[in-house]
């Protein structure tokens, strides 16, 4: 597991210094994270590593996962979609399930902490069981235009927190509690992002029987309609007229995402008959395989139509790949158009940019190099750990604008 | 007797206000209303963003006018507001308002920004961290200036003056009062910091004190 010193070779020295000094004043204090899945999705992934890093710098960090039932996860998926603006119907019974499952978890879990960070809407009702400490709701999704019925029900929970954190300023609501922005991050030393040897890449991809001679377009994301996998297939077909390429759509299932199988089936139906399209449902802990796929890709896409942050963009940029992403959510924070990749608004736009990069490999290399540096400066786990500890200091002195610690 | 100079580094936490402007009239109206810290953030903390490219305009209002409203003439006017010549952020706010109003007198009202491309007003909190570097003479000061993080340049040059209300930047104050080098202090005060990236500013400062 990571130690702070292991990041010295990649992170900004002043980021490491800040993290060390912020942690020194919090030594021995407790920092609890709660979410709804131990595997699958970016939140669980970074928590595994973040907790270890925080422990290494002396903060008593721990992580608890709420247990849910099938009806609970069906309800919370709807809440998730509604927060992202989709018109959804959530019955009073489903809201009751949402609350009651959290009540049950509150009797099972220890919720004590000097700082308690509750991730996303699934465990949001746990606020009803706060025993002490500062409680912060951490929203990883774009909740800027929620479906009003959903927001009305969720808002009383959210406003009972001491503060809320969003991944981007544009995701924030006008709330009566303080709000902060903390973008998520990737772990450059984790299995998904560490350097791989050519042999490790070959071994990881052996079973997929990909054609090494064809340029590979890749999208890594959950099978979710907001990630627009069908739009990616349309873009690939437009590119295919000019380049004999292959497309890989790879995504993990997540325990709290029952819609995934439905979207995957639709993708498989659309891809049927084309041996150059591969839709891969990856089991949890496929990090090395994803790493190998990203390192083997010629162009990486993240053609989302709604997005929280889109951490797969940072992952691909970190590997020096040209990335083409939908201009939504947190993707423009990672892709500065024409500098660290290309932002697009349609399948046609994605196809055009893919063709541009396939025509000019030098352009792809330049974009990738800038992208990697951009991620190094802004989206590594050390920055996120520093931000959380800085936020802790800020919560204690909310009326001040300049805080000396 | 030289007094010691302690270097600090800092990190900024963004605090979204939840308020946004979709067009220039809303921008103008919200520039009038928002907390002074919001104006500070959008005119000064651009420098703290660890961007890989050199920005066209070092303030958020000008960038939005150029990229989202596609009003490049307005962007040029906004970036020409000489921030350094104003004694307070309130005066900068007034200058921004005057600039937009004057522009609107001579030009048609621009179209709104596209959906999802609004201007989001943010406040910020700065967490100041001891860099662990204390120097007592000019050579050591120059050596430290070369190695401290770029946020230290930002803090001592912009934040100390604007948010902590000091009469000048920390570096020139120390050179004048702590090191007895009023000549160097005067040269530093002639630097227009808004024309540089933080690394560019570091180079300018080093050229003076070396």
Image (cartoon, coloured by chain):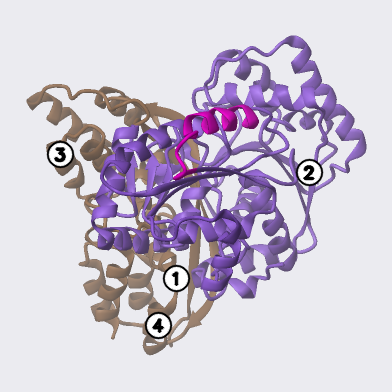
**Residues in magenta?**
A260-277
Q: Secondary structure at mark 3?
A: helix
Residues packed near mark 1 inside 10 Å, few (<14), some (14 to 19) or many (20 plus): many
- Earlier sequence position, callout 4 versus callout 1: 4
Q: Residue at x 48, y 61 (%)?
A: A295
Q: Which quarter of the figure has residue A377? A: bottom left
Residue A295 lies left or right of residue B43; in this view the side is right
Toward the viewer: B69 or A163? B69
Same subunit under labels 4 and 3? Answer: yes
Q: Give the residue number, with chain letter if any, for mark 1.
A: B149
Most distant residue in the right direction: A107
**Residue B157: x and y, percent?**
36, 63
Mark 1 vs mark 3, foreground winner is: 3
Q: Give the residue number, with chain letter if any, for mark 4.
A: B141
The numbered disc on residue B67 is: none
Q: Secondary structure at mark 1?
A: loop
Q: Which quarter of the figure has residue A253? A: top right
Residue A172 in sight here: no
The numbered disc on residue A133 is: 2
Residue B133 lies left or right of residue B26; in this view the side is right
Name the quadrant of the N terminus of chain B.
bottom left
Q: Please identify which colour was used for chain A in the image.
A: purple
Mark 4 vs mark 1, foreground winner is: 1
Q: Are marks 1 and 3 in contact (CB under 8 Å)?
A: no
Toward the viewer: A35 or B193? A35
Q: What is the magenta segment's predominant secondary structure?
A: helix
Q: Secondary structure at mark 4?
A: helix
Q: Give the residue number, with chain letter if any, for mark 3.
A: B72
């Amino acid at each position: 597991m990571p130690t702070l010193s292991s990041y010295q070779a990649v992170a900004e020295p002043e980021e490491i210094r800040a993290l060390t000094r912020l942690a020194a004043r919090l030594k021995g204090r407790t920092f609890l994270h709660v979410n709804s899945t131990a595997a699958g999705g970016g939140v669980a992934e970074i928590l595994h590593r973040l907790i270890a890093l925080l422990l290494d710098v002396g903060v008593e960090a721990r992580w608890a996962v709420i247990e849910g039932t099938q009806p609970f996860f069906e309800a919370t998926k709807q809440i998730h979609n509604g927060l992202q603006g989709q018109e959804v119907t959530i019955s009073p019974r489903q809201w009751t399930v949402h609350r009651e499952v959290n009540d049950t978890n509150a009797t099972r879990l220890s919720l004590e902490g000097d700082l308690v960070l509750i991730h996303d809407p699934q465990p949001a009702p746990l606020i009803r069981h706060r025993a002490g400490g500062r409680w912060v709701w951490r929203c990883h999704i774009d909740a800027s235009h929620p479906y009003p019925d959903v927001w009305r029900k969720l808002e009383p929970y959210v406003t009972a927190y001491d503060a809320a954190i969003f991944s981007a300023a544009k995701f924030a609501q006008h709330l009566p509690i303080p709000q902060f922005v903390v973008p998520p991050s990737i772990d450059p030393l984790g299995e998904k992002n560490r350097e791989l040897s050519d042999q490790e890449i070959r071994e990881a991809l052996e079973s997929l029987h990909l054609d090494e001679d064809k340029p590979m377009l890749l999208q890594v994301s959950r099978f979710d309609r907001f990630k627009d996998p069908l739009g990616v297939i349309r873009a690939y077909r437009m590119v295919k007229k000019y380049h004999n390429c292959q497309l890989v759509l790879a995504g993990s299932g997540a325990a709290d995402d029952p819609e995934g199988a439905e979207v995957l089936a639709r993708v498989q139906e659309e891809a049927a008959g084309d041996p150059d399209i591969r839709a891969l449902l990856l089991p949890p802990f496929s990090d090395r395989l994803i790493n190998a796929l990203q390192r083997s890709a010629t162009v990486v896409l993240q053609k989302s139509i709604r997005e929280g942050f889109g951490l797969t963009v940072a992952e691909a940029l970190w590997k020096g790949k040209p990335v083409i992403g939908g201009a939504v959510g947190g993707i423009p924070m990672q892709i500065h158009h024409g500098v660290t990749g290309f932002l697009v608004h349609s399948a046609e736009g994605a196809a055009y940019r893919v063709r541009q990069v396939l025509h000019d490999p030098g352009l792809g290399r330049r974009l990738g190099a800038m992208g990697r540096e951009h991620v190094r400066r802004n989206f590594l786990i050390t920055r996120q750990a520093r931000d959380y500890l800085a936020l802790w200091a800020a919560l204690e002195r909310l009326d001040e604008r300049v805080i000396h610690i | 007797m030289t007094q010691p100079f302690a270097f600090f580094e800092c990190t900024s936490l963004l605090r979204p206000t939840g308020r946004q402007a979709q067009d220039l009239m809303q921008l103008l109206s919200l520039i009038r209303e928002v907390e002074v810290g919001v104006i500070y953030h959008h005119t000064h903390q651009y420098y703290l963003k660890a961007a890989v490219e050199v920005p066209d305009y070092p303030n958020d209002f000008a960038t939005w006018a150029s990229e989202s409203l596609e009003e490049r003439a307005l962007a040029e006017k906004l970036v020409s507001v000489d921030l350094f010549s104003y004694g307070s952020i309130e005066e900068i706010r007034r200058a921004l308002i005057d600039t937009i109003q004057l522009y609107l007198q001579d030009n048609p009202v621009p179209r709104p920004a596209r959906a999802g491309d609004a201007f989001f007003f943010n406040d910020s909190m700065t967490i100041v961290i001891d860099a662990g570097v204390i120097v007592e003479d000019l050579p050591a000061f120059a050596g430290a200036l070369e190695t401290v993080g770029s946020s230290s340049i930002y803090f001592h040059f912009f934040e100390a003056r604007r948010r902590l209300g000091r009469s000048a930047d920390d570096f020139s104050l120390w050179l004048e009062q702590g090191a007895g080098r009023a000549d160097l202090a005067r040269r530093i005060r002639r630097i227009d910091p808004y024309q540089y990236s933080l690394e560019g500013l570091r180079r300018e400062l080093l050229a003076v004190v070396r």
